Image: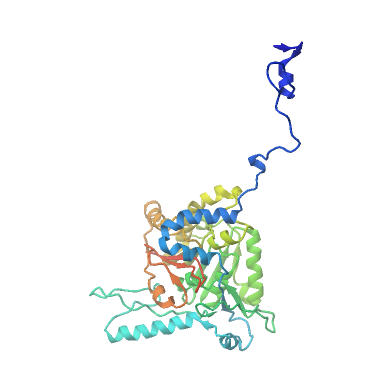
């Protein structure tokens, strides 16, 4: 078809007018933006939208308070470094109204034990889980005492005082390590005993590894993380807080934790599996390395599978009679209880390994003055962020391998 002796297609392609067809649309210098170039929603906002949709129904009327806490300044604890020779560190922290929440919990446990003894109740041996038993009458016993050399100072509920940066001793070792104090609960739940072989399967950046060393009980400590860059951070922590003779005894590796059972299966008395997760607080506050970035959607969706594989690997790395503590910094049941339930099932059906989740409810009793706990977990314990005690979220569950 032609118009005035000229082909129609080129006329339409170039936007020129043609008789009987009306004027062609004019081309403007500034055209409307396409979706591909439209401003993208920040990853932090995507994370918050996701949490509103999932945690809102999950937590109900508690979600607004938890949400507000997630968006406010994080509260820290000061993990005292027993390897440093800096004098009067504890006394100085106490002068600023900070207190060792672990020692306070231990005193509370002893008090409850005395009350229980007066009532004729018995307590399980501390070496096995530090958990609770049940009397023949079905009455729960008081919690076993917290046996740990770990000391961590926190400010009271509602006190938002910040710790000043740690200072080095004469050998250059820093006096304390600032971290979310709730992150120590998985280490306490592990209940390391003298000469235990301990594996920290996902160790970087190193706070929990440092806490394990503070127990002074590890016969051997293996600290692994698949990320080379994060392992470098682990080395830095050890170099800043641990004397050379001690850190050289720590085996630091960068294997894929899912393959650990093929390397050293059935070797360890205690295994800590602090898995990668949605890191809820980081996700709503920081754009850097945010798992809710659109390019990481697939990675985020695969997290529960990765977590399950790492937990199974941790179970396989544990000796019979040993313990595994699984932990996340997420509120998500899909990353918490569901992973535990599935791991117990797979260990039984595919590997003929019997495991059971231990009762950690005594942690709520002992640490309720410092942390806010959820009462809805089917398995394990969950620390909820709260404006007066803005730690967490931290989920942890202890599995015992028969």
Quick one: 245 or 377, which is closer to the camera? Answer: 377
Q: Quadrant of the N terminus?
A: top right
Colouring rule applied to residues: rainbow
Q: Is residue 57 above or below residue 90?
A: above
Rendered location of residue 353, percent (x, y): 38, 58
Rendered location of residue 324, percent (x, y): 45, 65
In the picture provided, is 114 more to the left or to the right than 389? Answer: left
Residue 394 visible in the displayed image: no
Residue at left offset 46%, top offset 76%: 193
Q: Quadrant of the C terminus?
A: bottom left
Residue 313 visible in the displayed image: yes
Q: Is residue 294 above or below residue 17?
A: below
In the picture provided, is 39 more to the left or to the right than 332? Answer: right
Rendered location of residue 127, percent (x, y): 40, 76
Quick one: 283 or 258, which is closer to the camera? Answer: 283
In which quadrant of the rendered view does residue 281 lie? bottom right
């Amino acid at each position: 078809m032609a118009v005035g002796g000229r082909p129609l297609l080129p006329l339409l392609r170039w936007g020129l007018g043609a008789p009987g067809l009306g004027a062609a649309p004019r081309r403007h210098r500034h055209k409307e933006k396409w979706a591909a170039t439209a401003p993208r929603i920040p990853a932090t906002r995507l994370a918050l939208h996701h949490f509103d949709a999932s945690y809102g129904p999950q937590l109900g009327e508690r979600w607004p308070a938890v949400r507000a806490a997630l968006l406010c300044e994080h509260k820290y604890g000061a993990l005292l470094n027993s390897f440093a020779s800096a004098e009067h560190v504890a006394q100085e922290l106490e002068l600023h109204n900070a207190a060792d929440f672990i020692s306070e919990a231990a005193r509370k446990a002893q008090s409850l034990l005395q009350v229980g003894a007066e009532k004729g109740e018995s307590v399980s041996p501390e070496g096995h889980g530090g958990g609770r038993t049940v009397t023949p009458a079905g009455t729960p016993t008081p919690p076993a005492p917290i046996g740990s050399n770990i000391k961590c100072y926190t400010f009271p509920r509602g006190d938002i005082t910040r710790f000043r940066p740690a200072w080095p001793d004469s050998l250059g070792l820093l006096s304390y390590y600032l971290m979310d104090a709730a992150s120590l609960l998985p280490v306490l739940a592990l209940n390391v005993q003298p000469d235990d072989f301990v594996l920290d399967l996902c160790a970087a950046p190193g706070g929990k590894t440092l806490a394990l060393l503070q127990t002074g009980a590890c016969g051997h400590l293996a600290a692994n993380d698949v990320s080379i860059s994060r392992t470098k951070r682990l080395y830095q922590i050890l170099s800043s807080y641990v004397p050379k003779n001690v850190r050289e005894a720590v085996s630091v590796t960068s294997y894929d934790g899912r393959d650990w059972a093929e390397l050293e299966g059935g070797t360890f008395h205690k295994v800590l599996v602090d898995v990668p997760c949605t890191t809820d607080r980081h996700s709503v506050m920081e754009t850097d390395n945010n798992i809710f970035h659109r390019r990481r959607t697939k990675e985020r969706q695969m997290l529960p599978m990765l977590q399950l594989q790492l937990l199974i690997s941790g179970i396989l790395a544990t000796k019979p009679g040993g313990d595994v503590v699984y932990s996340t910094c997420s509120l998500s049941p899909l990353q918490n209880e569901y992973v535990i339930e599935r791991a117990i099932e797979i260990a039984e059906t595919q590997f003929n390994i019997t495991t059971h989740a231990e009762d950690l409810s005594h942690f709520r009793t002992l640490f309720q003055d410092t942390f806010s706990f959820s009462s809805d977990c089917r398995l394990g314990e969950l620390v909820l962020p709260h404006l007066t005690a803005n730690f967490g979220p931290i989920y942890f569950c202890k599995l015992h391998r028969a």
